Amino acid sequence: MAYPKLTLSIILLNFIAYALQLAIPGVTETFSLTPNQVQPYQFFTYMFMHDPSGVFHILINMVVLIVFSGRLEKEIGWKPYLFVYLAAGLGSAFLYLGLPHDPDALLLGASGSIFGVMAAFAVLYPAEWIFIPPGIPLPAIAAIVIVALIELFSGALGLAPNIANFGHLGGIITGVAFMAWWKYLRRKPVQKDFEFVWE
């Protein structure tokens, strides 16, 4: 069975953007989200930037995207999937900027979007067993709750200063909200016309 095309396209775009970062000076600084001088386009382009000092950042993001996105895209369709991916990225950026942060640090990476995709997957398949580091099996809904709590406390306590924990949390919140809304629309009964009999 062919893998969903939009997911593959997003992965390809991330690697193309990463190659441009390595090949052209200034790409990372221009297209990452710069809190002290935000440009509107950066709210979208930052999702495709990754740490150019090594491949771990982009590789781990793309592996997680492969694990969760294909099934989600097949189930909800490519348009809702694209919406939740981009919306989670925006939600990630807005929550990050709305809370205390380093105004000189660049925000970059697909993590916010991917956390949103993971959260959407968990809401859609709450009983599906998945593994969270270091290999602990949990139902998807329990896993995403635990991950959200870890991100919340890590961000509040400053346990990972080079990681945008609140950005991850923003992606999770957006993914949960979108998928809850999507499931509500799917279950919403169709309004029927009534026949009236006059007495």
Image: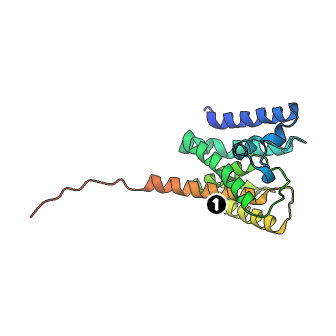
Question: As drawn, which residue projects farthest toward the right?
Answer: 53
Q: Quadrant of the N terminus?
A: top right
Q: Which residue is mark 1?
A: 141
**Three-letter amino acid code at the position of disc 1:** Ile
Q: Tag 1's secondary structure? A: helix
Q: Quadrant of the C terminus?
A: bottom left
Asked if residue 22 is positioned above or below residue 86 in the image, the reply reads above
**Spot occupied by residue 45 in the image (x, y as percentages of width and height):** 73, 41
**Spot occupied by residue 62 in the image (x, y as percentages of width and height):** 75, 42
**Spot occupied by residue 48 in the image (x, y as percentages of width and height):** 75, 41
Q: Is residue 130 visible?
A: no
Q: Residue at x 86, y 55 (%)?
A: 162
Based on the displayed image, in which of its 4 quarters is residue 165 positioned? bottom right
Asked if residue 2 is positioned above or below residue 84 in the image, the reply reads above
Camera-side residue of 110 and 122:
110
Q: Residue at x 52, y 56 (%)?
A: 181
| Total residue callouts | 1
**Spot occupied by residue 23 in the image (x, y as percentages of width and height):** 87, 30
Based on the displayed image, in which of its 4 quarters is residue 197 positioned? bottom left
Q: How is the image coloured?
A: rainbow
